[in-house]
Image (tube, grey):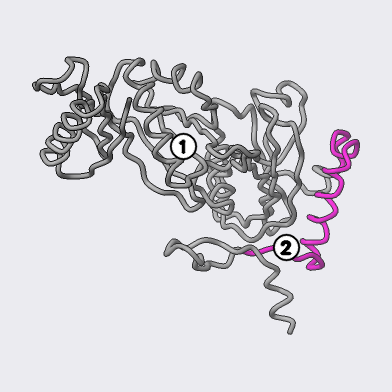
């Protein structure tokens, strides 16, 4: 027979209660009692023999639980912070899931640092699956209820920008790429790039222009954006077409990725055969033409405060329409 007791603090009292309970039960019924004492928190895993007149295989066994915090969706998030053998990890994992099941938890997230990657296979065999990975950890997830899970997918989109930098002479800043799909094609294109993690779209556009051409620029607005699918490792893509105002003129191209860079009359850029073949580029050319004639207004970034955070972020809106009211 096995009894499970839980105690958060008083290990001494729990141990002696086990001894008294087991001794009386064994004497009256002849049943050997085995106890499992589950302690919350990070403690050593050990077995404590009970020296008494009853059977030698009666013991109090401490089984640790993974330390975890609650998430916002009735789940828990645990992080492995110390090494352990896979056989020990199985016991800890099963005891933890049983504990969380009793608490009515749903999703279980376990962050596995790269130095404990030897435990990943163990967790997967217990029903966990990969959710996402970063350079220094792997995130695993498990669903406790006997229902279809509602765990959201990992990041679904990559975010990119295209930077239209137009000067007062109606010239646009264009580049020829040294690598990638445009390598060796002779096509002149706008500077483009990927938004870094934690980076604002407007800041990414300014950064990419500076990195590729050496030109300092001021972000004006988002003119449009395009969504496409199955682009980067089966993920979707959001591409924001941005317009910027140059603050400098002399070009210093990036040697690693850029073959050439120059200021080009807008009409010459628009007339390229490659641009005329592709509908997306034809739309961008029409927007640019309308913008330089004062007939098109995009979305400017307005600093705002988030509902659930003190961090400032940007709301992109058509400020021109507000000014017209």
Q: Residue 2 carries which label?
A: none
In the image shown, does 234 or 106 lie closer to the viewer?
Answer: 106
Question: Which callout, 2 or 1, points at the residue further toward the start of the chain?
Answer: 1
Residue that numbered label 1 is attached to: 109
Residue 234 in the image: x percent, y percent? 70, 29
Task: Quote the CA–CA distance across marks 2 and 1.
Answer: 41 Å
SS state under label 2: loop
Residue at the limit of the structure toward the front, as seen here: 28
285 relative to 259, above or below: below
In the image shown, does 95 or 26 lie closer to the viewer?
Answer: 26
Residue 46 in the image: x percent, y percent? 20, 23
In the image shown, does 247 or 206 lie closer to the viewer?
Answer: 206
In the image shown, does 251 or 51 lie closer to the viewer?
Answer: 51
**For the residues bearing labels 2 and 1, Cβ distance under 8 angstroms:** no
Region of the chain picked out in magenta, as a range: 271-300
Residue that numbered label 2 is attached to: 298
Residue at the limit of the structure toward the bottom, as seen here: 325
From where the camera sits, is residue 192 visible? no
| Quadrant in which residue 63 is drawn | top left
């Amino acid at each position: 027979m096995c009894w499970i007791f839980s105690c958060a603090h008083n290990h001494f009292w729990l141990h002696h209660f086990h001894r008294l309970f087991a001794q009386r039960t064994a004497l009256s019924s002849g049943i050997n009692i085995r106890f499992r004492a589950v302690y919350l928190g990070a403690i050593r895993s050990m077995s404590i023999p009970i020296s008494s007149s009853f059977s030698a295989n009666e013991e109090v066994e401490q089984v640790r639980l993974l330390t975890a915090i609650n998430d916002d969706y009735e789940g828990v998030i645990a992080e492995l912070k110390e090494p352990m053998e896979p056989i020990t990890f199985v016991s800890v994992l099963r005891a933890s899931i049983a504990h969380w099941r009793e608490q009515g938890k749903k999703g279980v997230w376990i962050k596995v640092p790269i130095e404990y990657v030897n435990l990943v296979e163990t967790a997967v065999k217990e029903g966990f699956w990969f959710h996402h990975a970063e350079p220094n950890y792997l995130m695993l997830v498990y669903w406790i209820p006997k229902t279809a899970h509602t765990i959201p997918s990992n990041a679904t989109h990559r975010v990119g920008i295209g930077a239209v930098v137009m000067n007062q002479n109606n010239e646009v800043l264009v580049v020829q790429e040294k690598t990638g799909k445009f390598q060796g094609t002779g096509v002149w294109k706008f500077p483009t790039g990927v938004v870094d993690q934690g980076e604002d779209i407007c800041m990414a556009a300014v950064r990419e222009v500076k990195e590729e051409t050496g030109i300092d620029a001021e972000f004006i607005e988002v003119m449009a954006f395009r969504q496409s699918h199955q682009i980067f490792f089966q993920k979707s893509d959001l591409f924001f077409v941005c317009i910027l105002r140059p603050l400098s003129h002399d070009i210093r191209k990036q040697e690693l990725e850029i073959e050439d860079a120059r200021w080009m009359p807008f009409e010459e850029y628009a007339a390229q055969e490659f641009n005329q073949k592709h509908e997306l580029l034809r739309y961008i050319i029409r927007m640019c033409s309308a913008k330089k004639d004062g007939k098109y207004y995009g979305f400017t970034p307005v600093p705002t405060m988030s509902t659930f955070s003190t961090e400032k972020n940007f709301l992109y809106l058509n400020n021109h329409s507000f000014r017209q009211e």
